[in-house]
Amino acid sequence: MIFTYNKEYVGDVLMVIVKNSGDAKLDAERKGNIARVFLKETGETVAWNIFEVSSLFEIENRGQVFLTDNQAARLNQELQAQGFTEEIINDKEPKFVVGEIVEMVAHPDSDHLNICQVAVGNDKTVQIVAGAPNARVGLKTIVALPGAMMPKGNLIFPGELRGEKSFGMMCSPRELALPNAPQKRGVIELSEDQVVGTPFDPAKHWTA
């Protein structure tokens, strides 16, 4: 789940994005200060809007935010009080981490894409389809995992590129909005001593 909050531009609304709805037709139901957004065809929940969330707890940050377990429990209490039976799952795993390309093959249906197996933690490898010209086996870079929100607001979900599944994105300095980022294609290149799975820290992982 992705939690986003921007009081100045959206209002006192916590948006909880459960899954990518794509181009599907949506509908919504509202009970009290909670609106559930769902797929019109199946009824599956894709998002929640929690209005006047500051009446439940304060949120200091803006953009993608991460809740405490107590805050998530308070949201679920409110959902239950309004008659909703689903629960909001609090995913606190880091969404931007150091990754290493451990395998790479050319995409069979593209002249510029590669299918990469990327280690993102201990015993955890994900497949990412990428077109970065500097991608290569052994490269360490920053990976945006499903559930990440990029600085410009676009969300990372599992998807497909030309028929091949992709579970994240290897990021360029420009996509991460890093200072003095070069305005050219290519993922960020980290030193070999960086530890796979380490959460992204601009101060540690970027020097312009």
Image (tube, rainbow, N blue to C red):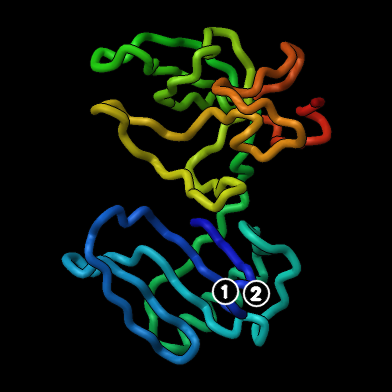
Residue 27 spot, x, y in % from top left: 27, 74
What kind of residue is marked 2? Lys
* Label pair 2/1, CB-CB below 8 angstroms: yes
In terms of image quadrants, where is residue 58? bottom right
Q: Which residue is painted at 54% across and 28% down in the image? A: 170
Marks 2 and 1, how far apart in space?
5 Å
In terms of image quadrants, where is residue 104? top left
The answer to whether 51 appears left or right of 180 in the picture is left
What kind of residue is marked 1? Val
**Residue ID for mark 1:** 10
User: How many numbered circles are shown?
Assistant: 2
**Residue ID for mark 2:** 7
Establish if 124 lies above or below 5: above
The answer to whether 184 appears left or right of 16 in the picture is right
Q: Residues within 10 Å of mark 2 (few under 14, many from 20)?
A: some
Q: Quick one: 161 or 81, which is closer to the camera?
A: 161
Q: Quick one: SS at disc 2?
A: helix
Q: Which residue is painted at 70% across and 30% down in the image? A: 181
Q: Residues within 10 Å of mark 1 (few under 14, many from 20)?
A: few
Residue 194 spot, x, y in % from top left: 74, 19
Q: Which residue is painted at 51% across and 21% down in the image? A: 118
For this orientation, the residue located farthest to the front is 183
Q: Quadrant of the C terminus?
A: top right
Residue 185 spot, x, y in % from top left: 55, 22
Establish if 4 lies above or below 33: above
Q: Which residue is painted at 30% across and 69% down in the image? A: 38
For this orientation, the residue located farthest to the left is 41
Q: Quick one: SS at disc 1?
A: helix
The answer to whether 51 appears left or right of 30 in the picture is right
Residue 29 spot, x, y in % from top left: 33, 82
